[in-house]
Image (spheres, helix red, strand yellow):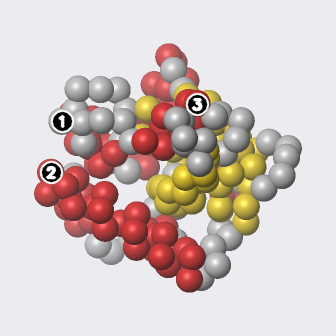
Amino acid sequence: MAPGVRLVQKVSSTRAFARIAPHVVPAMDRAVHRLTRGKVLLSAQLLPGVVLTVPGACSGQLRTTPLACMPVGRDGGTGSWVLVGSNFGRPGHPAWTANLLAHPEAPVISWKGAGIPVRARLLAGEERAEVWEAALKFWPPYAAYQARIDREIRLFRLERRDGPV
């Protein structure tokens, strides 16, 4: 584990972080991602990350959201990716999860600077339980997020699909 990761995990488990981070982290990620033409995602220096673009659930307008991800499969994650709808342990589901539920065939992710069309699937049952255990090993603060909210954190698997970027 890289130096400082445990400290970051401890800080990210706090309620103060949950209040501040949603306003700071995505804005910084979007700015750096745009300035580097998709090559750098600041938060990915700590956790792997993607930039998700998907039509809004109600508006249909494209929404772009930088997110931590858990790469799964071959070549360090080029097989599929898991997104965790933790919302930093805040009460409501993050908006991007509703967008994926409404448009599971439409998302595109930017992964290491490459645009990849993906299909999103909400995980349930035994598959969700297995992936949740893997997510807790991957980023232990997810347990603190789940403990302080009255909803089940949504988990999505993103898999490559054919189609335009």
The structure residue drawn at horizontal position 64% and vertical position 78%, both measured from the top left corner, is 37
Query: Which of disc 1 and disc 2 is earlier in sequence?
Result: 2
Dots 2, 1 in contact, CB < 8 A: yes
Give SS at disc 3: helix
Dots 3, 2 in contact, CB < 8 A: no
Name the outermost residue toward the top: 125
Q: Is residue 111 left or right of residue 18?
A: right
The structure residue drawn at horizontal position 60% and vertical position 42%, both measured from the top left corner, is 60
Quadrant the N terminus occupies = bottom left
Give SS at disc 2: helix
Query: Which of disc 1 and disc 3 is earlier in sequence?
Result: 3
Q: On the image, numbered disc 3 is attached to which residue?
A: 102
Where on the picture, by quarter, is residue 160? top right
Picture disc at residue 15: 2
Q: Is residue 155 placed above or below 87 in the rendered structure?
A: above
Give SS at disc 1: loop
- Amino acid type, label 1: Arg
Q: Is residue 108 left or right of residue 18?
A: right
The structure residue drawn at horizontal position 65% and vertical position 61%, both measured from the top left corner, is 110
Percent from the top left, x then y, of residue 7?
23, 66
Q: On the image, numbered disc 1 is attached to which residue?
A: 148
Name the outermost residue toward the front: 59
